[in-house]
Image (cartoon, rainbow, N blue to C red):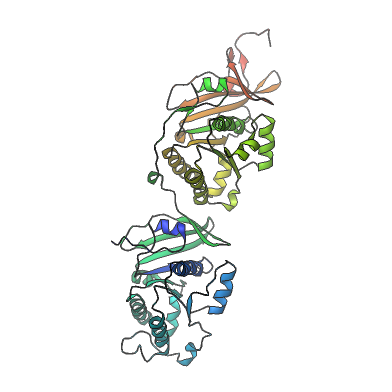
């Protein structure tokens, strides 16, 4: 196994490849039209230019002029890349339509082969991109001849330690399965209902990160978001209690929530879940710590207005850098992309608290079954816990009053702490009550208390006594009261 790696020019893909490609080998890039194969090849060659390496683009289908013109849309400047234009419009294809390729005795006589050998010998490229190699099928009589010529082609290109990336066109009538056996690695691009993705099912000589990784084609080219590997990330931290700044809530939690734990705040709409979570962040700001909120269901303007109205100065906190709030669009976001955003905040900006508000919105970005949501949240939460980050998940239950439900997304097993809020009807009015259902790291108060949200913030009353059936939503006093 070699330790030296060659960057693909795509950071996320280099991470999947555990550092990059192994030099002097050939790699197949396969996928349907429009999935980004040529874009990846351009990244690969331009990275070579940045590294002062010689590069060669052998284009067998699209003309060099069209490739360069399309590349400008991504702000790719290919002027420093050498092209060997063997596209159908190039003269070489009209000189002899019956030639064979790379028979050792014929190399110097065949027009196509002469063009390739002349270019390779003149340029002595470090990196070569062939797009697509399956075009050579049109120059051979059968699959056996194509495989023979493809082997000779790749062996010739890599014989002087050039690293080769080549694409294929897979169709129902013309499979590229045989090319996977000829290459040292396979990079697969896909564009399915759940979004663009990339995977590396084969990588000789080293391990590549398994799984399907999210991919995006942006104005800057290809961006890859690897699957999150929680166990690869860890740092030391002190599991101290974090106060909410609200005395009654801290009493319920016996001091607060511990650093590096996952807290689920659940309850129906309008009960105060987000407000409760932001109080922990307000207190964190006073300690000089940084918090991040990802809004999946509420827009930024509404969040700011509502928070300021209950004495949570989010605008000031954002200005000071103790709070970062990002409004998410789940339909345009994959779980891997979101995990990448979170990692950046944690590893580059030093976030201490991360709140996801709310789980239903995040579910939309997952675009999969319920167990997929749980798997994604488990990986993300485990990563954050390993990094000593405190996690707050806002989860909406679907009944305003009535039958009690701890969480709406079946996240109980993920949570170290569960704080539930509930609307109750009492004497014709709606009131809010809350309590703690679970706390792994310490004991907690098992009584329920009334919560109020006022212009001065969140307040929590004394334990409720003398009421029964509170969690049913319609409580009754155990004995007549004369003072209410």
- Tell which of 168 and 159 is nearer to you: 159
Q: Residue furthest left?
A: 1
Q: Quadrant of the N terminus?
A: bottom left
Percent across and percent down for residue 98 are: 42, 90
Q: Quadrant of the C terminus?
A: top right
Give me the residue at 42% from left, 56% from top.
15
Percent across and percent down for residue 252 are: 52, 21
Q: Is residue 481 above or below residue 341?
A: above
Q: Is residue 203 above or below residue 391?
A: below
Residue 299 makes an appearance in the image: no
Residue 83 makes an appearance in the image: yes
Image quadrant assignment for residue 72: bottom right
Image quadrant assignment for residue 25: bottom left
Q: Is residue 228 above or below residue 275?
A: below
- Tell which of 177 and 65 is nearer to you: 65
- Left or right of residue 330: residue 4: left
Q: How many marks?
A: 0
Give me the residue at 40% from left, 40% from top.
235
Give me the residue at 50% from left, 19% from top.
446
- Tell which of 51 and 268 is nearer to you: 51
Q: Residue furthest right?
A: 428
Image quadrant assignment for residue 309: top right
- Tell which of 33 and 458 is nearer to you: 458
Percent across and percent down for residue 117 are: 38, 84
């Amino acid at each position: 196994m070699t330790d030296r790696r060659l960057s693909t020019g795509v950071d996320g893909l280099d991470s999947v490849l555990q550092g990059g490609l192994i030099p002097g080998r050939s790699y197949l890039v396969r996928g349907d039209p429009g999935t980004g194969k040529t874009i990846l090849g351009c990244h690969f060659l331009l990275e070579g230019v940045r590294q002062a390496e010689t590069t060669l683009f052998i284009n067998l289908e699209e003309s060099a002029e069209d490739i360069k013109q399309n590349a400008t849309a991504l702000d790719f400047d290919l002027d420093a890349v050498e092209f060997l234009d063997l596209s159908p419009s190039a003269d070489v294809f009209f000189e002899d339509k019956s030639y064979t390729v790379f028979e050792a005795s014929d190399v110097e006589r065949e027009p196509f082969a002469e063009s390739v050998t002349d270019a390779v010998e003149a340029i002595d490229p470090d990196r070569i991109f062939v797009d697509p190699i399956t075009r050579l099928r049109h120059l051979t009589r059968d699959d056996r001849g194509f495989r023979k010529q493809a082997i000779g082609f790749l062996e010739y290109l890599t014989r002087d330690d050039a690293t080769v990336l080549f694409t294929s066109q897979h169709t129902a009538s013309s499979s590229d399965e045989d090319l996977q056996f000829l290459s040292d690695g396979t990079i697969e691009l896909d564009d399915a209902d759940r979004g663009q993705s990339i995977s590396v099912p084969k990588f000789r000589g080293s391990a590549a990160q398994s799984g399907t990784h999210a991919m995006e084609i942006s104005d800057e080219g290809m961006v890859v978001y690897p699957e999150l590997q929680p166990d690869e990330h860890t740092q030391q931290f002190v599991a101290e209690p974090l106060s909410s700044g609200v005395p009654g809530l801290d009493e319920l939690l016996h001091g607060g929530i511990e650093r590096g734990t996952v807290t689920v705040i659940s309850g129906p709409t309008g009960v105060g879940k987000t407000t409760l979570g932001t109080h922990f962040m307000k207190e964190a700001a006073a300690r000089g710590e940084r918090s991040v909120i990802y809004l999946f269901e509420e827009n930024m303007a509404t969040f700011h207005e509502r928070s300021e109205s209950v004495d949570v100065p989010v605008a000031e906190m954002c200005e000071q850098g103790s709070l970062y709030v990002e409004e998410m669009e789940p339909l345009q976001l994959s779980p891997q992309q979101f995990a990448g955003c979170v990692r950046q905040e944690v590893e580059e900006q030093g976030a201490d608290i991360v709140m996801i508000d709310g789980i239903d919105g995040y579910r939309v970005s997952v675009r999969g079954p319920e167990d997929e949501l749980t798997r994604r949240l488990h990986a993300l939460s485990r990563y954050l816990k390993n990094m000593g980050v405190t996690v707050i998940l806002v989860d909406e239950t679907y009944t305003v009053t009535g039958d009690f439900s701890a969480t709406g997304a079946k996240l109980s097993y993920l949570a170290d702490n569960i704080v539930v809020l509930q609307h109750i009807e009492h004497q014709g009015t709606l009131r809010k009550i809350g309590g703690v259902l679970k706390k792994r790291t310490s004991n907690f108060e098992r009584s329920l208390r009334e919560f109020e949200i006022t212009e001065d913030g969140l307040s929590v009353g004394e334990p409720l006594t003398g009421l029964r059936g509170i969690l049913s939503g319609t409580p009754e006093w155990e004995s007549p009261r004369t003072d209410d």
